[in-house]
Image (spheres, rainbow, N blue to C red):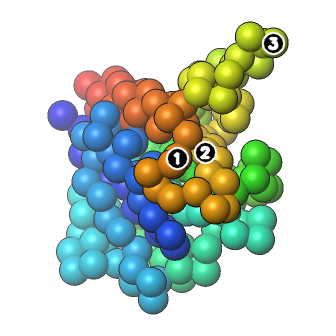
Amino acid sequence: MSKIALVFHSGYGHTAKVAEAVAATAGATLVAIDAEGNLPDGGWDTLAAADMIVFGSPTYMGSVSWQFKKFADASSKPWFGQAWKDKLFAGFTNSASMNGDKHSTLHYMMTLAMQHSGLWVGTGMMPSNSKAATRDDINYVASSGGLMTTTPSDASTDEMVAGDLATARKFGERLAAVAARIAG
């Protein structure tokens, strides 16, 4: 079985809920970046042992949170020795707006993965883009490069869009399948 580590920052709990949904079906170990931008004890070891690293961050002002950026900058230590070379990578983000410049966040994560000489895994999902589509359909936000979810700015974590969380679970299934296929 492949080892998947999901490293993420969540400012208000919404991104954490998405991380939990992805991890539940991917079989991933959660590595939460704290409010000061630090990993928990053993976090770097968990990432080093993983076959796949999944990045997660809210989109703030068109990019990752500063806490996630602090983690990314600190990853220059494994980068220098190419410790994560040929690992699989994927990513996800949540923001309050339907677009919210989430693609900029995913591009940042993709670039970080490529700098580590990694291999990026997208959603592998068709968009829900017909007239009959509803907000609760799988991949309604229509991202290919990574998982995107949208939570209104005044919504609690209990009010998150069910379709986005279902999409997160499908994304986790894809990550587990790709990791197993590559490792197997």
What residue would you read off at disc 2? 149
* Residue 90 point in image, percent of width and height: 51, 46
Residue 19 in the figure: left or right of residue 104 = left
Q: Quadrant of the N terminus?
A: top left
Q: Is residue 36 above or below residue 87?
A: below
Find out whether the residues at labels 2 and 1 contact each other: C-beta distance under 8 Å: yes
Residue visible at 79% across and 55% down in the picture:
101
Question: CA separation, marks 2 and 1?
Answer: 9 Å
Residue at the farthest bottom position: 36
Quarter that holds the C terminus: top left
The three-letter code of the residue at mark 1 reads Met
* Residue at image coords 81%, 12%: 131
Q: Secondary structure at mark 3?
A: loop
Closest to the observer: 62 or 73?
62
**Which kind of residue does numbered mark 2 sit on?**
Thr
Residue that mark 3 sits on: 131
Instruction: For label 2, count other residues whose C-alpha is less than 10 Å away and answer few (under 14), some (14-19) or many (20+).
Output: many
**How many C-alpha atoms fall within 10 Å of the one at disc 1: few (<14), some, or many (≥20)?**
some
Q: Please state if 165 lies on the left or on the right of 94 as rendered.
A: left
Point out residue 28 in the picture as x, y percentages from the top left corner: 28, 47
Q: Can you say whether 13 is above or below 182 in the image?
A: below
Specify which label sits upstream in the sequence, 3 or 1.
3
Question: Quadrant location of residue 36?
Answer: bottom left
Q: Point out residue 60 in the picture as x, y percentages from the top left corner.
A: 69, 69
Per the image, the residue denoted by label 1 is: 160
Reading the chain from its start, which is encountered first: label 2 or label 1? 2
